Image: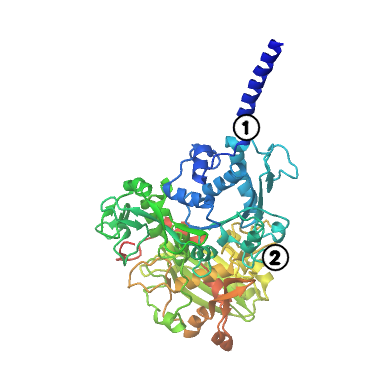
Amino acid sequence: MNDGNNNYKKGNIVFLKALNKAQKLNLSPPPVLSLSQWAAQYAYLSKETSAQTGRFEAYAYQVGMMDAITDPRVEKVSVMKSARVGYTKIIDHVVGYYLHQDPSPILVVQPRVEDAEDYSKSEIAPMLRDTAVLSEIAPDPKTRTGENTLLKKTMKNGASIALVGANSPGGFRRITVRIVLFDEVDGYPVGGAGSEGDQIALGTKRSETFWNRKIVAGSTPTIKGLSRIEKLYQEGDQRKFYVPCPQCGEFQILEWGGKDVAHGVKWDKDEQGNALPETAHYVCKHNGCIIEEQDKPDLIKGGEWRASAPFKGHASFHINSLYSLMPNARWSLLVAEFLRVKSDPIELQTFVNTTLGETFEDRGEGALSELTLARRAEVWAGEVPDGVVLLTAAGDTQDDRVELEIVGWGRNEERWSIAHVVIDGDPDSPALWQEVDTILKRQWYRADGHAFSIAAVCIDSGGHHTQRVYEFCKARLGRRIWAIKGGSEQGGQRSPVWPSKRPTRKSKGFRPYIIGVNAAKDIIRSRLKIEQPPPDTACPGYMHYPQDRDINFFAQLVSERSVRKRIGGKDVRVWEQTPRARERGFGFGGLLLRSIVWVNATRIKTERHGRSYGTKSRTHENG
């Protein structure tokens, strides 16, 4: 009997120990971790998503953004950011945290369905495979069920993730989530998700039943006043990352600066005035101290986030590439990028948006007029001026004539209008096209006798004589004579100026190049607005015109204006004819296509050919 009691006691002790262990392992709540702590403890960088695999180590500026997301006081987080700051990894870790640490239903909204699919394959799948605590709860990747698809996954612990495209009207239906992640919101389609309405409002509404919801939005910005992420940033407490100067200790934000201010990113020049990007450094705003690239790690490590507006549950952050410790964000590389694009307003906008993480201020049409352009008209020696290394031509058909413009190109897409030729006659007449061909075959001469042939031609095939243009161009594809046509772009849509694939003679049905008209107009107008350079001075992108053009020619160049309109609930920029141009019967269309920027045709060729511009080069102050 005693043996029985002893065995009972021993068994009871074993049971109680086992129960206690089980309670500690399975019944106790997990330790409270912030997002940065969870990432440091569990996150793993996969080979598909990082140059270096292994444990994740956050930059100091990432920690503040990450921990705001899991701060119980914060409901909304908005991040206006550049590229190369590791924001995608932050979003990955948010997904991992709310799948494992705090199991919740998650919605990720990408600009398009294709982007959502790509994010699932390139980021989510490797993370579920390689992060140990996530692979334990993830569904079998080899099994496809209603709970495990490319755009929807349910974990074994009940957490889930759904991915949608902002362009999908039905993507937001029948979804109830606690965590909503809006990625690249400035890339969301204008006009909302079809008839359903604004994408951010739709996604936010999916979370309204959760008292502890989290709404996170991030993006590189676009145009000032039109940017979604700029508006969200301004609605929050507007935090910026302040770093201490290693020399004087004064805190400041890192910003580009510019040529008119003493602080910011600067670089040296050689004796000829050429910029030396490899000398890039930062000048302290407070005391003019020189901060070198090698100081950056300690600089960032000592930084802190500071808000400039009251906190009301919405934490907003701004970060740019100057803070990045990634190898491709060294200050010398950023300076080289800036020097390459500074004279081209279109490419400069990309730099401002994606490198500085700032909105680009669209200054509109300003005071550009036909008189302004006419006063710039020049006289040059010879048919072809110095600086030209390549000739192209473009044509436009009317009912009683064909008009040709011969264009000379220099380095960095500087452009000279060499000749404007009007060939009167019936475009259905073979004789007229023979005359066109003769002009396109002739040579054009520089003052020193150097001869130029036309390297490529585009002819507008819109209008009443499409088939004749097709016949002429198809027979001469070997001479790079191509038919073009303006694309149909609605609601401010911007398509690439040139498609990647050109028509061939073997095509059964001949097709012209479809030109992105809105983007082309943007480029041409921005280049017409470049300030006139001094004589004999190179000016990338500048458009030169000779004095033999009449005022009506220049009036056509300013016969349309870019205006801001609200379409589908969103502000967009569209091109429309000016009232004065309508009265006088002017049109920008044909002249636009004759003035089209041959970016793909000229950029490579002008680097391989030719001669210098002249005797002088423009010099600029740093910044």
Q: Say if 249 sits above or below 148 in the image.
A: below
Q: Which residue is the extreme one toward the front? A: 1
Q: Which residue is the extreme one toward the bottom? A: 583
**Looking at the image, which residue is at 34% across and 57% down?**
252
Residue 609 seen anywhere in this rendered image of the structure: no
In depth, the one of 476 and 313 nearer the eye is 313
Q: Say if 298 sits above or below 513 in the image.
A: above
Residue 379 seen anywhere in this rendered image of the structure: yes
* Residue marked by disc 1: 23
- Give the quadrant of residue 26: top right
Q: Find residue 610 and report its horizontal and vertical position in percent.
A: 40, 60
585 vs 329, left or right, is right
* Residue marked by disc 2: 196
622 vs 343, left or right, is left
* Disc on res. 96: none
Callout 2: SS: helix
Q: Find residue 157 and report its horizontal and vertical position in percent.
A: 67, 40
Alpha-carbon neighbours of circle 2 within 10 Å: few (<14), some, or many (≥20)? some
Q: Quadrant of the N terminus?
A: top right
- Give the quadrant of residue 394: bottom right
Q: Find residue 396 and report its horizontal and vertical position in percent.
A: 59, 74
In depth, the one of 106 and 46 nearer the eye is 106
In depth, the one of 99 and 171 nearer the eye is 99
Q: Amino acid at mark 1?
A: Gln
Q: Do the numbered discs 2 and 1 sit on residues whose CB atoms are within 8 Å?
A: no
Callout 1: SS: helix
**Looking at the image, which residue is at 42% across and 64% down?**
410
